[in-house]
Image: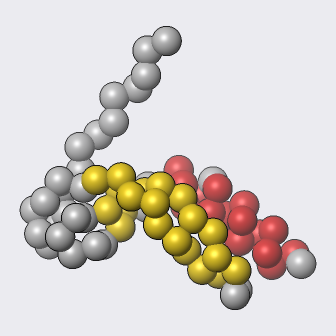
Amino acid sequence: MVMAEEKLWKCGKCKEDLVKKRTAFSYLGHTFSTEVMCCPKCGKVFIPKELAEGKMAAVEQELEDK
């Protein structure tokens, strides 16, 4: 099985290579975590479009429907 090559992203502020890190997100009083690309120096995270419009949007909709 051939895995897709991941893009190398750099922090716009620190110019450091982003690394994967499990990060917690909160919405409407609920917390969930997922692995995202993060700057090891300043801690800013990169949320790719696919995650924002996919998994995160689904979780937000599910919480709003409760």
Residue at (70% x, 86% y) in the render: 28
- Residue 65 sits above or below residue 9 on the image: below
Residue at (28% x, 53% y) in the render: 19
Lateral position of residue 26 relative to residue 15, left or right: right
**Res. 49 in view:** no
In the image, residue 40 lies at what x, y percent?
22, 64
In the image, residue 17 lies at what x, y percent?
17, 53
In the image, residue 11 lies at what x, y percent?
19, 63
- Residue 66 sits above or below residue 51 on the image: below
Q: Quadrant of residue 60?
A: bottom right
Residue at (59% x, 58% y) in the render: 53
- Residue 5 sits above or below residue 27 on the image: above
In the image, residue 65 lies at what x, y percent?
87, 75
Q: Quadrant of the C terminus?
A: bottom right
Most extreme residue toward the bottom is 29
Most extreme residue toward the top is 1
Lateral position of residue 55 relative to residue 6, left or right: right
Q: Quadrant of residue 36?
A: bottom left
Most extreme residue toward the front is 22
- Residue 65 sits above or below residue 55 on the image: below
**Res. 64 in view:** yes
Return the residue nearer the eye: 23 or 13: 23
Residue at (72% x, 61% y) in the render: 58
Q: How is the image coloured?
A: secondary structure
